[in-house]
Every structure is written in C-alpha cells, then in structure tokens.
Amino acid sequence: MTPLQLFDTYERKVRAFEPLTAGRVGMYACGPTVYNFAHIGNLRTYLFEDILRRVLEFNGYEVHHVMNITDVGHLTSDADSGEDKMELGSKRTGMTAWEMADYYSEAFIADLERLNILMPDVWCKATDHIDEQIAFVEDLETKGYTYRTNDGIYFDSQKLNGYGHLARLDVEGLRQGARVQPGERRFVTDFALWKFSPPGEQRQMEWQSPWGIGFPGWHIECSAMSAKYLGDFFDIHCGGEDHIPIHHTNEIAQTEASRGTRLANFWMHGYFLQVGDAKMAKSDGEFLRLKTVIEKGFDASSYRYFCMTAHYRTQMSFSWDSLQATNTALQRLYQLAYDWGEPGEIASGMLGRFADHINDDLNIPRAIAVIWDMVKADINKADKKATLLEMDKVLGLGFADWRPQEREVPADVMALVEQREQARQSRDFTRADSLRAEVAALGFQIEDTREGPKVTG
C-alpha cells in the first residue's frame, strides 16, 4: 500500500504524513457557527473531513477528533465590525441566543448523522471555554502582542514576523496602502481578541474580563480550545477554503505569538460547492439544506456519494441533474452489492489499488473508479462483496445495511404479470418475453420461482 500523502496548505504541497505521536493522530475541525442551519455547501466540508478521518483509521491510526461549535463572537464582518451573528440570529428567530445555539447545534448534528459522518470525540463550545480564551489573551498581552482600542483588545499583527504565510498575504503591499486611524485598529490585518460590550447596552452573551465586560473574538476560541484538547502542536487542522485568508491565518498568528508553534503540522481545506457560478452562502438568504435534498426524494447517501465524485481540493458545481445521475449510479451499485450475497475473501489486488488512490491525498474519485472496475472484473461475487465492504470503511455508504425498497405493485402491472404467466403456461414464450419487457418498462422486474412469479420494483 502506498504510504499516506496529504496536501498541506501551509507548505502548499503534497507531503508524506507522519503522526507526531506514533499510531495516534490529533485532528481539529472548525465546526459551525450556530446561527442558522447548515447548507449543503457547509456539509461538503464535513464530508471531506469525515473521509480524511476514515482514511487515517484505514491506515491504522487512532484518531482523536475535536470539533468546535461557535456560539459567540463571530461578527458579520471579517473586519471585526457589525453585529455578532448569534445576536443577529436571535432577532431573526425570536429565540434567545442560547436557545438558538442549542436548536441549530442539534440540527447540525442530525445532518451529520443522516450523512453517516463519524461524530467527533470532543465537541467544544466557545461559551463553555471563556476562561481558557481570557487566559490566552492575557498571555498574548503579557508578551506584548496586544493593544486596546475603544471597542476591544486587538492582536498587533505587525509585531509577528511571517504573519499571513498560510494565505500568502502581501503584507508589505497592505502596509503601504494602510491608513492609521486613532482609536481604532492600527493595521488592516490586526484582529479582535476581546470585544467590549457597547456602552449602555446589555448583550445576551457577555462576560466579565480583566478588560471589562465583553465577549471573545471569533479566532481566539480555536487556539484556546485546540490547545486544551490536543496540545500546542498537533497533527491536522482542517476546515473550508474560506478559512484560509482570515480565520486560520489568525489562529496561527495567535498560537505562534503565545506558544511558538504554527498550531498544526498539516493544514487541510475543503473547497466550495457552487450553484451556477456562485458559491453557496447563508448571507444570501436562500440556501439548500440537506432536508431539501431529502424532500426531493434523494437519500442522504446520494448526496454523500455525489460529493465523493470530485476531489476535495476542487470546486464543485451542484445541480439536480448531476445529483440524479450520481443517485442512479449509487442505487445500481447498492443493488449489485445486495445481489452479490454473503461476503467471501477480500480481493487484495483491487483493495490495493483502492488504497493507493485514497492515500494519494484522498483521491476518492479514482478510488470509486476502482470499484466500478471491480464490478466488471472476473472475480466471484462473494469476494467482490467482501472487498466492497472493506472499501466502505472509507466511503461510509452503508452497503452492508442496504436493502431494496419494496414498492406496492399496481394493479395494471399485476394484470400484465398474470397475462405473462398464462402465456408461459401456454408455451407462448415470445408473448411472455414481450410482457416481461412491458413490466420492466414500468419499473418492475419479474423473477420466476417455484411458488410462482415474484414482482419487485
């Protein structure tokens, strides 16, 4: 089996994966901001992370998987202005910010379960870790990386050599065009560590701190919580490509300044799902949920399979026609696997080819192509079944549990079946074959048994 190689955004190259601790992998995934439902574009990122975890486990590693839930501090503007998304969502829904956080967290977890995404070992909420975040900011303050403005405590990005390396930011170019405004942040890439509650206004989510009443900035939660659960330097940090220029860049800056590490050995990012020419975004007001996909008659597994037909580092376009095409292919594969019966022995050659592709930076589309090669290969059905079930430890499509859905056979179809049976008994096999074709055209199949014809569809 080819050794595992993964693309590291920090180094901008595919490199061999070696865990920091033999046999064990620490993995942190940026979770949702729970002010609304997750859309299917968000879920594509969590599917990529699920495949990553499954590939690591396929390679024999024990994965310690941590995911945060952002329930405070994520402002509507990346420039650390605007309303907190939780406070804004509370106004929209009529729920308190606390009630809304619980409601959308539960909805998010339900979507993960429908998609057969493995649950993290640790869920960590920002509001449960305020003390850890304050302590992290205090450490940055002690080391001289902060300053105070009229609205909060900010990180001084100009004091950190190499700031912006993850996103390859042109910091010098930004510096030449920067304007310093007294009482505000000093430089365009500086960011809030702690925000003050507006004077004369009581927020739903606010805490006492050494700097006054307020709430944490968005980025500090991940540095503080990942350090608590995984240490100051761990194996893999992942998220969506939109996290690269700001959120993950600032996580790295905080941790470099405080702990002297870049936080994670590998930085990995899933790319956007597009609808037409535009990326899907909650800010648009209209977005597709997994619930919508299911209501249109697709299984959640069909969307899972759809996402696996493109490499995680390529942007992907969604359409109902493309989802229908992948659904048709998946249903055929389910039926084939079911018809293969009980599993036999694993076909090592096929599994080896599959493993080579998944270990080549999670090349799942090529791995799926191996499965279709196996369908046509001269291998006995029992061994195909055993091999597919082993591959499904990575794919997570549930081939072992799939069963054909029994449909009620309409009266007109049953009438054709009875006519065919009469034709067979009269030895009019030409008419019998014609009637079988008519039944098949209506979406049903006839299986002749000792007890008589069996109709499925």
Image: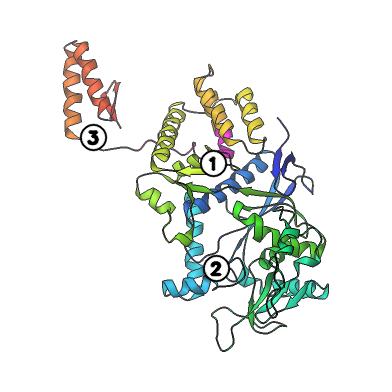
Which residue does the image show at 54% across and 68% down from the upper left? 76
Label 3: which secondary element: loop
> Residue 452, how many percent across, how many down?
25, 23
Q: Dot 2 surroundings within 10 Å: few (below 14), some, or many (20 or more)?
A: some
- Residue 424 occupies which quadrant of the picture? top left
Figure colour scheme: rainbow
Q: Dot 3 surroundings within 10 Å: few (below 14), some, or many (20 or more)?
A: few
Name the kind of residue labelled 1 in the image.
Answer: Gly
- Asked whether disc 2 touches disc 3, contact meaning CB atoms under 8 Å apart, the reply is no
Magenta stretch: give its range: 389-408
**Which comes before the other along the chain, label 2 or label 3?**
2
Which residue does the image show at 72% across and 56% down from the upper left? 170
Residue 386, can we see it?
A: no
Q: Which residue is mark 3?
A: 409
Q: Is 445 above or below relative to 233?
A: above
Label 2: which secondary element: loop
**Which comes before the other along the chain, label 2 or label 1?**
2
